Image (cartoon, rainbow, N blue to C red):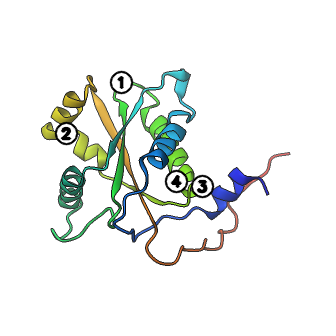
C-alpha cells in the first residue's frame, strides 16, 4: 500500500502524551508539511505558531480550558509538550479550508515521524483575545488572523489506538 494512504488510514487522535519534547528537527518537518498544504489561489495565507516554551504552552492550555468550560486542572492538550497554533488571514475567503488542510498535513507528518497528534479547537476564540493579538504582533504577524486549530504533538503515552470500523453508506457513485 502507498505510504501516504497507509498513514492516512493509521493516524489516530492521541489523548495521552509523554512530557518529553520531540526533537526540533521533527517539529520543523511537521511544520514544513503544513506549509505545503493545498491553499486557495496559492495565497499561502496561513501561519503556524510553534509553541514549545512550557510557560506559554501552559497559558494556552489554561485559556483553552477556560474557553471550553472545563475545570481549571484539565489539560485540553492531554499533556502534549508541543502546540502548533494554526491561524489564517481573516480576509481570505478560503481561510478555514486552507488552515484545515495545514492541520491535516501536520497531523499526517507527525504520524509518519512516529509522533502522536490531535486537533484541538477553540483557537478561533483565543485569536479574538487581545493578549493573543499582542502575541502575534510581538512575533511579527501583522494583520487580522483567525485561529483555525491547535495541532498538539508529542510522544504517545500508552497504546496507539486502532481505527474503528468505517460506517457504511458514506460513498455514492455516479457513473
| SS type, badge 2 | helix
Within 10 angstroms of label 2, few (less than 14), some, or many (20 or more) residues?
some
Within 10 angstroms of label 4, few (less than 14), some, or many (20 or more) residues?
many
Please, is residue 85 above or below residue 69 in the view? above
* Residue 103 makes an appearance in the image: no
Location of mark 3 (residue): 112
Q: Position of residue 137 (x, y in %)?
A: 20, 28
Location of mark 1 (residue): 91
The label number, if any, that marks residue 14 in the structure image: none
4 vs 2, front mark:
4
Q: Earlier in the sequence, mark 1 or mark 2?
A: 1
Location of mark 2 (residue): 132
x 58%, y 61%: residue:
11
Within 10 angstroms of label 3, few (less than 14), some, or many (20 or more) residues?
some
Mark 4 and mark 3 in contact? Answer it, CB < 8 Å.
Answer: yes
Depth check: give the residue in front, 100 or 5. 5
Location of mark 4 (residue): 110
> Residues under labels 1 and 4: Cα distance?
29 Å
> Residues under labels 4 and 3: Cα distance?
5 Å
Q: Earlier in the sequence, mark 1 or mark 3?
A: 1
Amino acid at each position: 500500500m502507498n505510504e501516504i494512504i497507509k498513514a492516512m488510514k493509521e493516524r489516530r487522535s492521541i489523548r495521552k502524551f509523554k512530557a518529553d519534547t520531540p526533537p526540533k528537527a521533527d517539529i520543523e518537518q511537521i511544520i514544513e508539511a503544513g506549509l505545503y498544504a493545498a491553499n486557495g489561489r496559492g495565497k499561502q495565507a496561513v501561519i503556524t505558531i510553534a509553541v514549545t516554551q512550557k510557560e506559554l504552552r501552559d497559558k494556552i492550555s489554561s485559556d483553552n480550558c477556560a474557553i471550553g468550560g472545563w475545570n481549571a486542572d484539565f489539560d485540553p492538550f492531554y499533556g502534549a509538550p508541543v502546540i502548533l497554533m494554526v491561524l489564517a488571514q481573516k480576509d481570505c475567503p478560503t481561510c478555514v479550508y486552507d488552515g484545515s488542510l495545514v492541520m491535516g498535513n501536520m497531523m499526517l507528518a507527525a504520524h509518519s515521524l512516529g509522533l502522536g497528534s490531535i486537533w484541538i479547537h477553540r483557537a478561533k476564540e483565543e485569536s479574538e483575545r487581545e493578549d493573543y493579538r499582542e502575541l502575534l504582533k510581538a512575533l511579527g504577524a501583522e494583520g487580522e488572523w483567525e485561529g483555525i486549530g491547535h495541532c498538539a504533538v508529542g510522544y504517545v503515552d500508552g497504546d496507539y489506538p486502532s481505527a474503528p470500523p468505517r460506517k457504511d453508506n458514506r460513498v455514492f457513485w455516479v457513473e
